[in-house]
Structures are given as C-alpha cells and as structure tokens.
Image: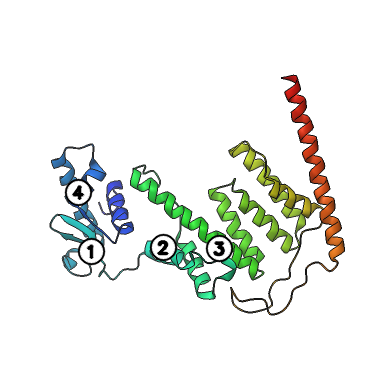
Amino acid sequence: MGLDARKTQELLAFLLIQRSRAYSREFLAEMLWGERAPAQSKKYLRQTLWQVHSALDGPSQAGDDASLLAVEGEWVRYNERCPVALDVAQFEDAYARAVGVAGCALDAPCVDALRQAAQLYRGDLLQGCYDDWCIFERERLQTMYLAMLDKLIDSCQAQGQYERGLGYGATILRYDRAREGTHRRMMQLYCLAGDRSSALRQYEQLVHALREELDVEPSRRSVLLREQIRADAFPVDPPPTGGSPGSPPSGPGPRQADPHTYLRNLHSSLLAMQQQIRQELEVIELALSDA
C-alpha cells in the first residue's frame, strides 16, 4: 500500500515534524485511532509502521542506520542517523536564522536560505486532516512561511528588486487576501518601481478584500498612503547601487528633488483625508439622529 493510506501519511508527518522526541506506541495508537479499542488501534499502528518501513527502507535495510524510523520496544522516533535530507528541517532552520533580524538587514546567505525554504513550501500540511495536532502544526508552518515572505519583501525593497518583492506579496495574498500590511507593501513597491496606477489598483483590491472578508474599511495608514500616491507625494529612495543584502547604501540617497514640493503635496493629501473623514462623520451623525 506504500504511503497512499491517509493514516500512514499522518503518522510519518507527525514523527518527522516532532523528530526531536520519541513517542510511545500507546500514544501514537491513541492519537491516530482513538475511536478504536486499544488492541485494535495498536494493531493498526503495527501495520502502519510496517507500511512506512516497506515503502521507504526496503527489506535489506531493516534495523540499520539507514532506516527512517527507529522502533525500540514500545517507543518510536525519527532516526537522526538516517542519511536523508528533511525539507521541514531545512525550512525550520532557515526561519530560525532570520528570527529577530529585519529583512533589510539580512545577509546574502540568510536571504538565499529563506528563498530556498520558501520554495519548499508547496502547500498547507496534510490538507483534509483536522486532528488537533495537525491543525496546530499546519498553522505554525504557514505562519513561519508568511513571516519568511515578509522578510524577503523587505530584502527585495532594500535591494531595489521590486518585481521579485511584488511576487512574494502576491503569494502572501493567496493565503490571506485581507492582509492589509501586505497590500500596503505592494503599493509601496509599485510606487518605487514607477507604476503609480498599479499601486492605486492595489488599494482597490485591498478595499474589496477587507469588505468581503472582514466587512471593514481600510485603516487610516492605508488611506493616507493612497492619498500620498494620488498626490504624487510618496517618497521614493533610489535603490542601492551595489553591496550585499543588509549592507548600507554606498552613498547618500536624496529623496525627491524638491522637499518643498513634497511637503506641499503631503499637506494636500492630508487635507483631502481630513475632508473625507469630516464627510463620513456627518453621515454617521445624520444616521444617529434618524435612529
């Protein structure tokens, strides 16, 4: 049967994710077949372990260091001496390297590790399995994945790789289309790339996503960013001309050529937003008076 059986996949996924610990047969049998009688659930576990061994190890490797799982009496664990590369281990290692470091400050090896790890994520863990342990791990791994993409966006922006950064943003929105911060980052990247119309279209996508998913309107930060873009007042820094990710720019980078023009445009956008808020307050007051 190989790895086609759902319970076989679940057992293998659990032991590989929890590879630093050993688990008793009783615990594993209860976790996977808790609705069955103890004798029946233990029988199923024996059969499943045999399926994993037959599919991955082969009869000639039984009991040696090449076996993926180590079964020692009543305990089962991942065999750390098995000469295999685990994608989940590489994924978690790359995430750990970047924890606590801003995306714009990541060095080149760390950025490469994050990019490779992001490519390993092909979809949510064991879709269709709703056991508590799987739901927790599925959400944990997805959260790590989205955090990696956030840092990669920061790195791309720092290096002037706006198109690649937009690709990472689009990937995030496939998992969470109402993630407001990602929409704003993409609006900024479009502006930095000189595509103001796409930045404004991204704002409209944000409005639709928030209304459909959460029944709310964009935050003030998003509205202000939209007004800055409409007024052509978004500050644009030139991308660095060299160096590795995380290194400081090679020289001073002026913002817009005329700071007075920038301030006038910003003032205009703030006045426009103030007027919009005043109008919305009048509508609310009118509705309250009629209630």
- Residue 19 x %, y %: 29, 60
Alpha carbon distance from label 2 to label 3 = 15 Å
Label 2 SS: helix
Q: Is residue 54 left or right of residue 269?
A: left
Q: Residue at x 59, y 73 (%)?
A: 246
Q: Are marks 2 and 3 in contact (CB under 8 Å)?
A: no
How packed mark 2 is, by other alpha carbons closer than 10 Å (few <14, some 14-19, many 20 or more), is some
Amino acid type for the residue under numbered disc 1? Asp
First reached walking from the N terminus: tag 2 or tag 3: 2
Q: Is residue 178 left or right of residue 91?
A: right
Which label number is shown at residue 57?
1
Amino acid type for the residue under numbered disc 3? Lys
Which label number is shown at residue 92?
2
Q: Is residue 126 visible?
A: no
First reached walking from the N terminus: tag 1 or tag 4: 4
First reached walking from the N terminus: tag 2 or tag 1: 1
Q: Is residue 17 left or right of residue 71?
A: right
Front disc: 4 or 3: 3
Q: Is residue 162 above or below residue 222?
A: below
